[in-house]
Image: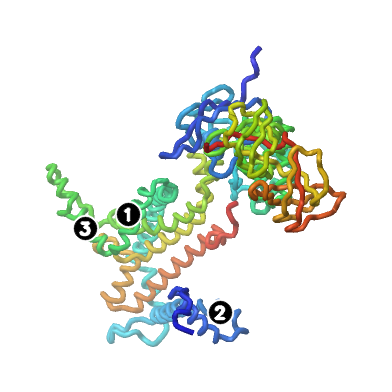
Amino acid sequence: MSSSDTPSFQYPLSWRILDRAESVAGLWPGRWSSLTGYLFLVPALLLVFVLVIGLVYIFDYSLHELDLSTYRLKDAFSLVNYQAALKSVTYRIVVLRSLGASAIVTLITMVLAFPYAYVMVRTRSSFTRKFLLISLFLPFFIGQVVRAYGWLIILGKEGLLNTFITSLGLPPVKLIYNYPAVILGLVQYMLPFAVLLLAPAVTSISEDIELASEGLGANWVQTFRHVVLPLARPGLIGAGVVVFTLTLTDFAMPEILGGGTTDFIANSIYDGFFQISNPGLGAALSMILVTLGSVIVTVVFFLAGTGTLVSTEGTP
Amino acid sequence: MTSPLPVVELRDVSKSFGNVRAVKNVSFTLPRGSVLTILGPSGCGKTTLLRMIAGFDAPTSGEIFIQGQPVSSVPPYQRSIGMVFQKLALFPHMTAAENIAYPLKMRRYDPATIPGRVERYLQIVQLSGMGTRRIHELSGGQQQRVAIARALSFSPDLLLLDEPLSALDKKLREEMQLEFRRIQQELAVTTINVTHDQREALVMSDEIIVMSDGAVQQAADPVRLYREPSSRFVASFIGLTSLLTGRATKIQAMDVAIQVGNMVLKGRTADETIQNGAWVECALRAEQVRIFPAGKGFAEFDNALEGVVDQQIFEGDRMVYQVRCPALGDAPIFVFDHDPAHHQFHQKDDSVRIGWNAQDLLVYACSDA
């Protein structure tokens, strides 16, 4: 046969590569095929496992007192670090401040994110949708620290806002290194996460359901309250939990925009490890943070029902 | 003497999306208690028309009147219209009863009367005792019933059906068609139904409007629409219809002779503008054609032809044949054979004779002439 007889049709390269890969995968014994699916879980499980090992070590640190003569942790087990952390008024304020900020940031973010997600999903104008999507993703490329510095440029003592205020002949205002500045920075940081998590929730509510509600006699406020909000609940809770935990464990915003005046738990942990070189205390604070976050998330999911994590009912 | 006010009246309603005219100058009136079906292929503008009546879209021009009042500036929630959506759009977070109570609550009915009303409508749709079920705990047919009850519980002036049966399997769909008809007659509610299912249109309606390309093609009651389709489009959209193109050779009042291929066929037309020698289109319903083995006589038919079976399909209660007639230039003719007595099926490539009467060959002026 001459070479001109070879068929002109060839599988695309991607098919051929996958065929090779499949022939290698064919070596996997058939009677283990029911395990194949679990195999793909292994890398993720390994990562989680490493995290657990780290957590075990930190837990171990937290149970040893710092020996001030050697600056090493003593061998003997003790609860001294926990006592110190829980009795200290400073740390109690830090914990309450973190919790309070998480609650406030979550609330504000959800109120701002929901209309954003709603319009982004529902708009018929592709320009509007693209504009909203780009505005959403742009901050991701910038990073938290740079964004915090951006706020310094705007809100700082000689920042844009104060330049404007003083140009009007008014005295400069202290806009940074306080609690509201940290909240502001955090809300801006959390907004894209919340929108991204809420968008699928809005998408899953069919437009017909909203129209049906209107046709049945509900104006848009009633439709929002009785139909949209209840149907978006899983998304709202999921997004709320993410925003809450991210805020609770945040480090950069309170560090940069708080300027040491409004430390969160993560800042105290950092100080424990690296400023006062007491890994035992830092570890104890870490364990308190992990416990606090876990308990809150568990309670929320318990109250909201399992349907929040994995949808169990379809929308007809 | 004035006739009673129509429940719905459309005057010259048009709707454009950008440069696309989705609905073109549609007018009709609908008297109280009757059922109108808007029938047409997908994309013909029928759903747009329904959405305008419901108030979800505004007409670009023209006006819609409900109970004599223009409604263009009335939002949907202030219109008295119940609608059953294609995908039902039931509220999944509520029970069946809560779904039915929703319009009553939104329309501020006396809370004391709501449970009684909900119970009554559950009964009407034969779902008594199922009120506490969640929507996803109900079967497809039961969900249909909840959607009907929800659309009717507040006694709307008008019921709109946006192809709610299209997702059901055939048996359930036919059952629900009769069920709709029963409920509609029981409550005497004025209804507009939108569908692409010709059978559903014939079964459920007092009046049918056939639409294509945004314009009304014909408005008539089901029998007239089926027997006297006003155009080739309507004839081919409803029923199984063979289409032939030919030239009119002799015209005498409604009787036309048409040259198709080598044959002269006898047909009938309602169009007085057809001239001798003009190109015409003919439509022939499959049930009006008889089929016989080759060589058997059938002198009683006005048109009789020799042909060959191209395809035969067994549908249980009937055979559907596709017959190729060389004399007609091989145009396929569809034939239904219901005769249970002769039990003789023609096979593919069998020679057969087919015949039909002049009155069943409907002749139209060529639409693209």
Report the front residue among B243 and B73: B243
Quadrant location of the N terminus of chain B in the rendered image: top right
Residue at 65 percent across and 44 percent down: it is B262
Q: Quadrant of residue A152?
A: bottom left
Residue B283 relative to residue A9: left or right: right
Q: Quadrant of residue A86?
A: bottom left
Query: Which residue in the structure is indicated by mark 1?
Result: A135
Rendered view: A7 above or below B270: below
Report the front residue among A42 and B28: B28
Rendered view: B299 above or below B92: above
Q: What amino acid type should be assigned to the residue bearing mark 2?
A: Thr
The CA span between labels 2 and 1 is 41 Å
- Disc with the residue nearer the chain's start (2 vs 1): 2
Chain bearing mark 3: A
Rendered view: B183 above or below A72: above
Residue at 26 percent across and 64 percent down: it is A145
Q: Residue furthest front?
A: B262
Q: Dot 3: few (<14), some (14–19), or many (≥20) neighbours within 10 Å?
A: many
Residue A36's disc number? 2
- Disc with the residue nearer the chain's start (3 vs 2): 2
Report the front residue among B192 and A44: B192
Residue A144 relative to residue A309: left or right: left
Residue B283 relative to residue B343: left or right: left
Q: Is residue B113 visible?
A: no
Q: Position of residue A299 (x, y in %)?
A: 51, 62
Q: Position of residue B231 (x, y in %)?
A: 61, 35
